[in-house]
Image (cartoon, rainbow, N blue to C red):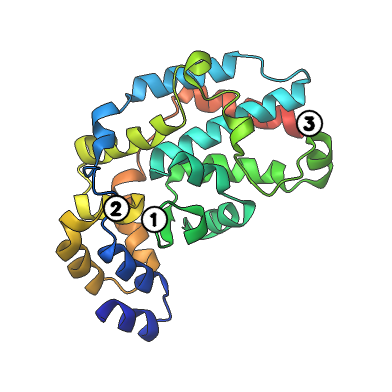
Amino acid sequence: MFLRWLAERFDEPVFEEYAKLLKWKGKKTKKLYTEEEKAITLEKLRKAIDVILSGKWRRYKVNDAFMKLRAIAAIILGASTGLRPFELYRIEDKQIKEGIKKRYFILPEEFTKTPFERLIPINKESHWILNHFMVIWENKKLRKKLQLQSKKMFPKDTITDVIKKRVSGIEVDNLRDFEVDYSMNKLGVPGFLEAIIAGHDTEKYAVRIENYLKGKVTKESIRDDWLKYWDKVEILTKEQKNEVEKLVKSILE
């Protein structure tokens, strides 16, 4: 009842969605944060990015550069937010535009595994690469040249051409595994906050989540609490970041 009152009082429907989250038990057979058991390391993520940067994925130079940028943007976003593979595949330009503007976006309920929408914060590194990506995405001449017709930013059939174990050494579901492990074991993100953002089974943290939300009346305050931990995280090395900037420049030339 309290969360629904918050939703009406502050015109923030996300609080009503979190009321649903508190009731959701997830799969009965799955333990909380089992992703930690199969997590990959930051070093392995970076090696996969090196493979993507050094490979040739498309016949024409501009298409190849865009494929690399797209795959790396998917890695950075997925590995810093805990999005599930099918959630990542469903993201459209609307969510990315919102993320660039507000440093978070709302993942619609129909895009998720969970029966509620979620707030997805965008850290500095994700904001940086997604901003570059959207400059290209919204260029009408480039969209025609690259034959971009779908609204989906990271479609499965495209992303899995590159992000798969036998090609780059990682799978798309490893991105969520990385986020969970890094949040809990490296950054010290509180379990209840991890549950809110990544959409885990919340039974263990139900009381903490409700108490936390009682003191938070805006989406921005939830975003800011998450970014206290994730905003300084950099998956890309300095050299990789330079290579990404070269990709962007080559596409825009």
Q: Is residue 120 above or below residue 236?
A: below
Tag 2, which secondary structure? loop
Disc number placed over residue 114 in the picture, else none: 1
Question: In the rendered structure, which amino acid carries the disc numbered 1?
Answer: Thr
Mark closest to the chain's N terminus, 1 or 3: 1
Residue for point 57% across, 52% down = 96
Residue for point 26% across, 65% down = 23
Tag 3, which secondary structure? loop
Give the x, y percent position of residue 5: 31, 84
Q: Residues within 10 Å of mark 3 (few under 14, many from 20)?
A: few
Residue for point 55% across, 59% down = 98
Observer-nearest of 155 and 23: 23
Question: In the rendered structure, which amino acid carries the disc numbered 2?
Answer: Gly
Question: How many angstroms separate mark 3 from mark 2 (CA)?
Answer: 48 Å
The quadrant of the image that shows the C terminus is top right
Mark closest to the chain's N terminus, 2 or 1: 2
Q: Residues within 10 Å of mark 1 (few under 14, many from 20)?
A: some
Q: Is residue 16 left or right of residue 240?
A: left
Tell me where residue 136 sits by quadrant.
top right
Reading the image, the residue beneath label 2 is 26
Tell me where residue 211 sits by quadrant.
bottom left
Q: Is residue 23 above or below residue 51?
A: below
Give the x, y percent position of residue 192: 22, 55
Tags 2 and 1 in contact by the CB under 8 Å rule?
A: yes
Reading the image, the residue beneath label 3 is 253
Residue for point 38% across, 68% down = 17
Q: Is residue 12 above or below residue 97?
A: below
